[in-house]
Amino acid sequence: MLGFFGVHIAALGAFFTGISTTDIVVCVTLYWVRIFAIGAGYHRFFAHRSYKTGRVFQFMLGFVAQSTAQSGLIWWASKHRDHHRYSDTAKDMHSPRQYGFWFSHMGWIWNNQAQDANYDNVQDLTKFPELVWLDNNRFMPAIVLGVAVLALFGWSGLWFGFFFSTVLVYHSTFTINSLCHVWGRQRYLTGDDSRNNAVLAFLTMGEGWHNNHHYFMSSTRQGFRWYEWDPTFYILKMLSWVGVVWDLKQPPKHVLAGERKLSSELKDRVAAQLAATFCADTLTDSVHARLTKSGIAVEDFKRNLAARIDRGRDAIQHFELPELPELPSVDEVRARAHKMFARSPSMDDIVLRARLMLGEAVSTRLATPA
C-alpha cells in the first residue's frame, strides 16, 4: 500500500521541522493510547469478544483503534479470527513458518489474498450499523486525528507526534504476528509457533503473552501469571469497576495449570508436526529391503498393513503395528515429543497418532509405483 509507505515517509518530515518536547509528549501519548485501543479494542473485544461493553464505548474503541490506519475494525477482527483458525498453516497469511519473517511482519500488506476478508465470520459485528459505517470509512479516524494534531501542535507535531507514533504502533502490532511466532517461550502446547515474549508484552501493553493467548484465546487477561505485565487488562479491570465494561473473562485453574485437553483437530496437527521429524522415505526403504530379503509379496503386505491402519484409526489407544518393526517405538516418539513441545495431558494420544501417521506414510509410499 502506498499509504503504508507514505506514513513512514511523512514521519521523516520531523528532520526538517525539528522536534520539541511537546512533540515528544504527543508522540508518546498517542502511541500508548492507540496501542491500548488495538489490544483492548481490535483484539480482545472485536476479534475475541472477551468482555462486554455498550455500543457507545465499542464505537469509541473502534474509532481510536482505526486512527492507527490499520484498516477497519471488522476487517481486522475477521482476519484475526482466521489467524487463530488456521494458525501457522498455509491458510495463515501471517505465519513466519509458512511465509517467512518479513512477509508475516508486513509483506502481507501487498498481497491480495491476505487482504481479502470473508465477513461471514464476523456477523456478531456486522449487525451494528455504526460499526459497519466505521469499517467502511476505515481511514477517516486517522485523517481526523492527523488534522487535529496539526491544528493543535503544528507541522512538527504532525510529522513526529502523529506520523512517527503511527509508525511505532504499526511495527509494535506487527511484531505479534512475526516475532511472537519466532522468539520467546512456549508454556503451553497450542499446535502452532506462538510464544510468550516479555519485551513485546511491554511494548504492546500485554499482547506479547502470545502463547498464553493462543492456549485460551477467550481470556481478557493475557498475562496469566502475576508477574506477566498486562496493563491493557489492568485498565479494562478498572473500567469494569465503574461499569464501562463488564464480564471480563479469565482463564480457569485447569487452563493455568496446562491441563486443558486439546481438540481432536489440534492433536492431529501436533501429531503431524511430530511425525514429520521422522524420515518416512528411510523407513519405507527399510521395509522394502526386509520384504525383498524375506520373499514376502509386497501387495499382500500392503493389504494387511492398510487393514491394520484402518483399525488403528478407530481404536487409537490400542494401535500397534507389528508388521512395521522399523517404526520408532512409542517411547522413542514420546521422547522426541517432550523435546519439541510443552507438557500436555493430550501427549500420549498425540504420540500414538504420530505413529499411526508414520504407518500411513509408509503404506502410501509402498503403494506408489517406483
Image (spheres, grey):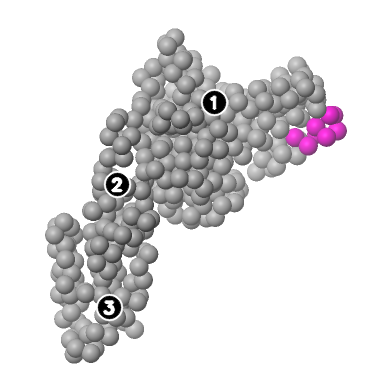
- Nearest the camera: 245 or 274? 274
Q: Earlier in the sequence, mark 2 or mark 3?
A: 2
| Whole-number angstrom distance, CA of label 2 to CA of label 3 | 33 Å
- In primary-sequence order, the first of circles 1 and 2 is 1
Please give the label number shown on residue 344.
2
Q: Would you say 8 lies left or right of 267 here? A: right
Q: Amino acid at mark 1?
A: Ala
Against 27, residue 174 (above or below) is below
Which portion, as a residue range, is magenta?
11-18
Residue 263 can be seen, yes or no: no
| Local SS, label 1 | helix
Label 2 Cα crowd, 10 Å radius (few <14 / some 14-19 / many 20+):
some
For disc 1, the marked residue is 37
x and y percentages locating residue 271 in the rendered image: 31, 57
Q: Position of residue 84 (x, y in %)?
A: 41, 42
- Which is nearer the eye, 198 or 113? 198
